[in-house]
Amino acid sequence: MPTFNDLYWMPGGNPDLKEEKGWSSDLGIDFEMISGIHQLNFNTSFFNNFIENMVIWLPTTSSYWTAENLEKLWSTGIETNLKYDIKLKSVQLGMDVFYAYIKSMYVEEKLNLFNVLENTINNNYYQSATDYNGNQLLYTPEHSGGIIFSSAYKQFHIRYNHCLVGKRYITQDNNNSVDSYHLGNLSLGGYVKMKTSQLNIQFKINNIWNQTYEVMAFYAMPLRYYSLSLSYNFNKLIH
C-alpha cells in the first residue's frame, strides 16, 4: 500500500496512487569455515522481483519530486559477501568484501517465475525496446561494492571502509546519469567501562580522500569532514 507521505505529502504527494502488486524469489548459498584463530564466511544470493504499480518518487519540472506508479518493473541480480577474521590474543583483524549487481528494468509484459527464467537466459529484457522498456530504474546503480578493514585491540578499534557506487541514471530514457564514485571513511574509537555503565568515544574522518561526488543530481556532497561522537550507556537500571 502507498504510505501516507506518498499520498498526501505537500508538495508531491499523489492521492491517485494504485496498490503495489508483485512477487519475489531468491536463491542463496552460505558457507562458514573456522580453523583455530581463522574464520571465513561467504554468502551469495540470486534474486528476481516483479512489481506492478511500484511507487517511486520522480523529479518534476518544478523544484520538487512527486510520487508515481510504475506500470511494471523487473529487478534481478546477485549480492555476495566475503568476510575473514583472525584473532591473535588481544588483537582481532578483519576484512569484509561485498559486491552487488542489480538490474532493475521497466518491462512491457506481466512476468511470472517461468518467463523470467526464460528471459534471463535469452537476455530479452536487457535490450532497449519502445519507450523505456529494458531501461534501468532511476538512481539504481547496476554495480556497487566495497571493502572494510577493521582492527581491535582490547577496548580500542580502528576501521576503514571504502565503497564504490556505479553510475546512476536520472532520466527514464537513460540518456543522462550521475557519475560513479568511490568513497573512503576512517574511524577510530574506544570505550571505558565503569561499574554500572560504559563511556564510548569515536572519531571519524568522512570522505578521507576528499572526493567530489553526487548522490542526487546537482546536489554536491561534502568534501572531507570530521566528526566526534560520545555516548554513555547504563548497564544497570537505576531505581
Image (cartoon, rainbow, N blue to C red):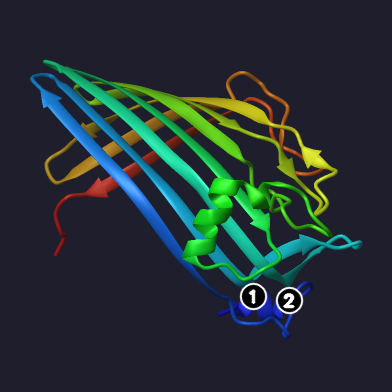
Query: Residue at 49% across / 29% down in the picture?
Result: 146
Label 2 packing within 10 angstroms: few (<14), some (14-19), many (20+): some
Q: Say which quarter of the image contains residue 85.
A: top left
* Residue found at the very far top of the displayed protein: 88
Q: Say which quarter of the image contains residue 229.
A: top left
Q: As drawn, is 2 to the left or to the right of 222?
A: left
Label 1 packing within 10 angstroms: few (<14), some (14-19), many (20+): few
Given residues 188 and 146, the one toward you in this image is: 146
Q: What residue type is labelled 2?
A: Gly
**Is 200 placed above or below 208 here?**
below
Given residues 106 and 8, the one toward you in this image is: 106
Residue under pointer 2: 13
Tag 1, which secondary structure? helix
Residue 193 is situated, as x and y percent measured from the top left of the image, at: 18, 35
**Is 102 placed above or below 189 here?**
below
Residue 85 can be seen in this image:
yes
Tag 2, which secondary structure? loop
Residue under pointer 1: 5
